[in-house]
């Protein structure tokens, strides 16, 4: 009986194996943190590549002999992005403006009642010619000669590591980047703007 008691006391003081137990408690948290760091690093790198590609596309678009058009630009951006994210889908949006100062600006209107809203048949300049007042005066598409074009690329791809759900992240990453391009002056720029009335 005493022998068993001595063994039990010896086992109580024995610290062999503590490291294994402590590691088993810490390892899952450490691994999830490591995965999170890798995931964030990959996302930051992909974002910087997308921004760099968009800046180069903007520079190339200004060259007269670049032959750059919507299809060429979109293909270039998609090809470059797919090098680091092969399964990425890339969508594009273009909005044309008369000048750089017009980018993402609202259409001008006479705010006769001073409420800051285009209403009560107030007159507005329909810069994008769509028949209604818009908070963004851009016209969808590439526009015409000398127009400034806001060119936006949005890429979506599955996360690099499949354990995103463990740290509360969505399964797909969505990144977006924009650049403003100037169309070549091969024609006279259209300066006409229709004037319409805001809805009552």
Image (cartoon, helix red, strand yellow):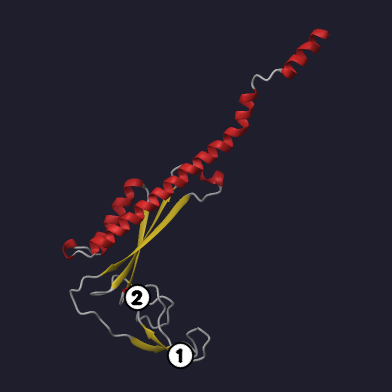
Quadrant position of the N terminus in the picture: top right
Q: Which mark is residue 167?
A: none
Q: Residue at the spot x=29%, y=52% of the render?
A: 79
In x, y percent, where is residue 43? 43, 49
| Chain-order first, disc 2 or disc 1 | 2
Name the residue at 45% across, 87% down: 198
* Dot in front, 2 or 1: 2
Element at label 1:
loop
Describe residue 144's horizontal placement relative to residue 9 as left or right.
Answer: left
The CA span between labels 2 and 1 is 24 Å
Q: Residue at horizontal 45%, vertical 52%?
A: 173
Q: Against 108, is 73 above or below?
A: above
When asked about the image quadrant of residue 129, the answer is bottom left
Q: Which residue is drawn at 28% across and 62% down?
A: 58
Between residue 87 and residue 190, name the one nearer to us.
190
Q: In this view, does 18 lie above or below 80?
A: above
From the top left corner, tell me how far across and down residue 24 is, in percent: 61, 30
Location of mark 1 (residue): 122
Classed neighbour count for the residue bearing mark 1: other residues with Cα under 10 Å, few (<14), some (14–19), many (≥20): some
Q: Could you tell me residue 84's position as x and y percent?
A: 35, 46
Can you see residue 86?
no
Q: Mark 2 points at which residue?
A: 101
């Amino acid at each position: 009986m005493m022998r068993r008691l001595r063994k039990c006391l010896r086992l109580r003081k024995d610290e062999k194996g503590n490291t294994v137990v402590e590691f088993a408690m810490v390892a899952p948290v450490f691994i999830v943190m490591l995965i999170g760091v890798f995931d964030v690093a990959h996302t930051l790198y992909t974002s910087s590549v997308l921004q760099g590609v968009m800046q180069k596309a903007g520079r190339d678009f200004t060259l007269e002999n670049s032959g750059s058009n919507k299809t060429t630009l979109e293909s270039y951006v998609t090809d470059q992005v797919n090098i680091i994210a092969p399964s990425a889908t890339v969508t594009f949006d273009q909005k044309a403006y008369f000048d750089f100062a017009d980018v993402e600006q609202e259409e001008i209107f006479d705010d006769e009642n001073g409420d800051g809203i285009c209403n009560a048949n107030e007159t507005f300049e329909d810069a994008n010619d769509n028949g209604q007042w818009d908070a963004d005066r851009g016209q969808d598409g590439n526009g015409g000669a000398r127009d400034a074009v806001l060119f936006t690329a949005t890429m979506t791809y599955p996360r690099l590591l499949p354990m995103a759900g463990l740290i509360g992240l969505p399964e797909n990453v969505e990144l977006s980047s924009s650049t403003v391009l100037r169309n070549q002056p091969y024609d006279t720029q259209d300066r006409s703007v229709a004037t319409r009335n805001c809805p009552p």
